[in-house]
Amino acid sequence: MDSFWELLRGLHDSYGINLVHFYDGFERGRLLRGMWTTVKLAVICIVLSVVIGMIGAWLQGSRLKLLKALVQGYIQFFRNTPPLVQMYFFYFALGPQMPRIVNEHGIAQPMLGSFEWAVLSLSFFAGAFNVEIFRSGIEAVQKSTVEAADSLGFNRLQIYWYVVLPLAIRFCLPALNNNLVNLAKTTTQAYAIAVPETLFVASQIWSDRINVFEMMITLLTFYLLLVGMFVWIMARVERALHVPGFGR
Amino acid sequence: MTVAAGWTPDQPIIRIVDVHKSFGTNAVLKGVTFDVAKGEVVCVIGPSGSGKSTLLRCINALVPIDKGSIKVEGREVHDPALDKLELRKKVGMVFQSYNLFPHKTALDNVMMAPLHVLKRGKDEVEAQARQLIKKVRLEGKEAAYPGELSGGQQQRVAIARSLAMNPDIMLFDEVTAALDPETVKEVLLTIRELAEDGMTCMLVTHEMGFAREVGDHIYFTDRGVIVEHGPPESFFKSASDPRTRQFLSQIL
């Protein structure tokens, strides 16, 4: 491995191609930590936003007008405002309102850090779209299938969980995948509240080492691979959920 | 359903009294009254739009009624405090368009309600489900999905699915209407066997031959009322009402 790093160092010395973020142990360390943060951020937000979508779509079918109105208000707020503004709102407006806790060094610090706020704001943002995506899937489920479950004694939650949701997911998977891919890419926005994710550390590195071009290529390649992997996984999921003789 | 106080099996298992139902301004049921005895096979016939299917749906509370009374084993169905689950454990329903769960295999379709609604043990439920699949002559199709089965096969899975709840009454809503003539036979055979086992059955049907052979009592409905009824021999031979005669002449 060391000889490979030496080779990259040689590229810099001989040709001016500056891949210092690979061959320098310190820079490599912070880049990898940044990438790991991105992966964590993306995975947590994807899971949370899907859960929000499922619960929101379930509440939308409620008979209580107030609940429906709340879900509708949530969707309108998060769909009709810019995600960056939402993130600033969470971090700069809501953040300081939260109670502070004392850490192990005896210093008071905010209860939620920038990473947690990024998770919340991105999950709610993508979740609002997921509610609408799940709703479109639910509306594609035949009423007669629901009626059959009803006549077998299933209650509303059981109908949703065992019949409607499994079918709805199959109907809306392509749209859901689109939104989740967008969410994975939107994690770069956490840069704005100083979450040390990939874009954030990359900009630190290129400021320190003046290798903007090489960092940009590295960044794009990283996201291409990350999202490509996600798309591959979702294609597998889609295949696994395929039911013989249904759809397609 | 814990048997309602005062109901004994020698009383009508379904008692329908002056039931009215409208959808908006469209009055579908305009005062329907009749009884079904335990073990009886009742066939409801009549032109489309005469309220036959609505009547069936009212019996297991899929559709609320506007006026009147429906009692199943002595329990008032038209009661806001009705425990729907208790009613649906007693009343199985099979639909014209089968309505199987398309993402579940035939076996899983049969197992789902006992597992999730009745919370019975998996082994016991599976054993019963396999037996029911055998009963409807679909052995070997346990792992097939609805989309891989013919209409007649799907309908027989749907019957097995309802039977898995161990109902006392089975409602059949034009269950052969969407099938081709070949497969109608296999579904009717299954229903006939059920009737012979003593299951109380109520069928909305256009299969006059079947109604005549298997039915204990025929009801002819038109425009929301029962026009005429009787045991099949007399009903088909000597229907007196002109509307019945006209309907029968068109269909036979």
Image: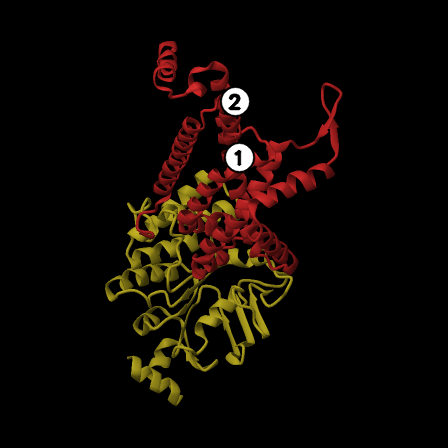
Chain colours: A red, B yellow
Residue B202 at what x, y percent from top left? 43, 67
With respect to residue A130, does B74 lie above or below?
below
Say what secondary structure mark 2 lies in: helix
Residue visible at 50% across and 57% down?
A: A150
Residue B247 at what x, y percent from top left? 35, 83
Mark 2 or 1: the one toward you: 2
- For the question of whether residue A77 can be seen, the reply is yes
Disc 2: which residue = A208
Residue visible at 51% across and 50% down?
A: A129
Q: Which mark is residue B82?
A: none
Same subunit, tags 2 and 1: yes
The chain holding disc 1 is: A
**Type of the residue with mark 1:** Ile
Q: Quadrant of the N terminus of chain B?
A: bottom right
**Type of the residue with mark 2:** Asp
Q: Quadrant of residue B7?
A: bottom right
Mark 2 near mark 1, Cβ–Cβ under 8 Å?
no
Q: Which residue is farthest left? A: B182
Residue nearest the observer in this picture, B63 or B10: B63
Q: Which residue is farthest top? A: A3
Residue nearest the observer in this picture, B160 or B5: B160
Disc 1: which residue = A44
Count residues near mark 2 (Cα–Cα under 10 Å), then give few for <14, some for 14-19, many for 20+. few
With respect to residue B64, does B245 lie above or below?
below
With respect to residue B142, does A202 lie above or below?
above
Residue B48 at what x, y percent from top left? 39, 77
Task: Indicate left or right for A165 with B79 as reference.
Answer: left
Which mark sits nearer the N-terminus, 2 or 1? 1
Residue nearest the observer in this picture, A211 or A128: A211
Q: Quadrant of residue A100?
A: top right
Count residues near mark 1 (Cα–Cα under 10 Å), then give few for <14, some for 14-19, many for 20+. some
